[in-house]
Image: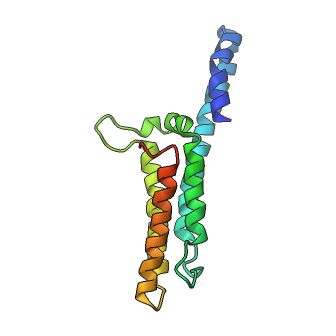
Amino acid sequence: MFDRTLELQSEVEAVFAGDECAENRKSASTLVKCLAQAAKKTLIDFKDSIVKESPKNTSTDGDVHPLTSYVGNYIKYLMDYQSSLKLIFQESSNGDGTKSGLVSEISGLIHAVETNLDVKAKQYKDHALGILFLMNNINYIVRSIRRSQGFSW
């Protein structure tokens, strides 16, 4: 929706040219900003839900946790919209070599799931099984990201 609205912005400017239509142009511009804010809030809320996900839902065999596969798939899905997300987060990016807003947000998602997995791994009575659980889950995340379109970042 953000992409299409942004694409239409130049047409809105052309169709609603003139002082009498300034409010229409302003509304279209505001809509693009609201959509960008909604996308940012969605990522923030998703990260919060990862952090708050109950540590009691741990597999007993050290296998990949459903949360891990969900987050991995979500990140792959986000990479389908990489160009839009880069536009949405462009105001967060710095020219000083620090991470862009999009990379920072995705890194935050990965960090949140890693933190959650650490807590889950500590619940295993068998320490080796907890380590295996962490290795399986982190390997899954790494492989998911490598297969996505976002590996270059």
Residue 124 position (above or below residue 89):
below
Q: Position of 62 compared to 5: left or right?
A: left
Residue at 45%, 46% in the rendered image: 151
Residue at 54%, 78% in the rendered image: 55
State the quadrant of the N terminus: top right
95 and 107: which is toward the camera: 107
Residue 87 position (above or below residue 143):
above
18 and 45: which is toward the camera: 45
Quadrant of the image occupied by residue 130:
bottom left
Residue 149 position (above or below residue 33):
below
86 and 9: which is toward the camera: 86
Residue 98 position (above or below residue 130):
above
Residue 7 pos. (x, y %): 63, 24
Q: Residue furthest top?
A: 18
Q: Position of 127 compared to 86: left or right?
A: left
Q: Position of 103 compared to 66: left or right?
A: left
Confirm whether residue 150 shows in the render: yes
Q: Position of 129 compared to 21: left or right?
A: left
Residue 57 pos. (x, y %): 60, 79
59 and 48: which is toward the camera: 59
Residue 48 pos. (x, y %): 54, 62
Confirm whether residue 122 shows in the render: no
Residue 95 pos. (x, y %): 32, 34
Picture mark count? 0
Residue at 45%, 90% in the rendered image: 126
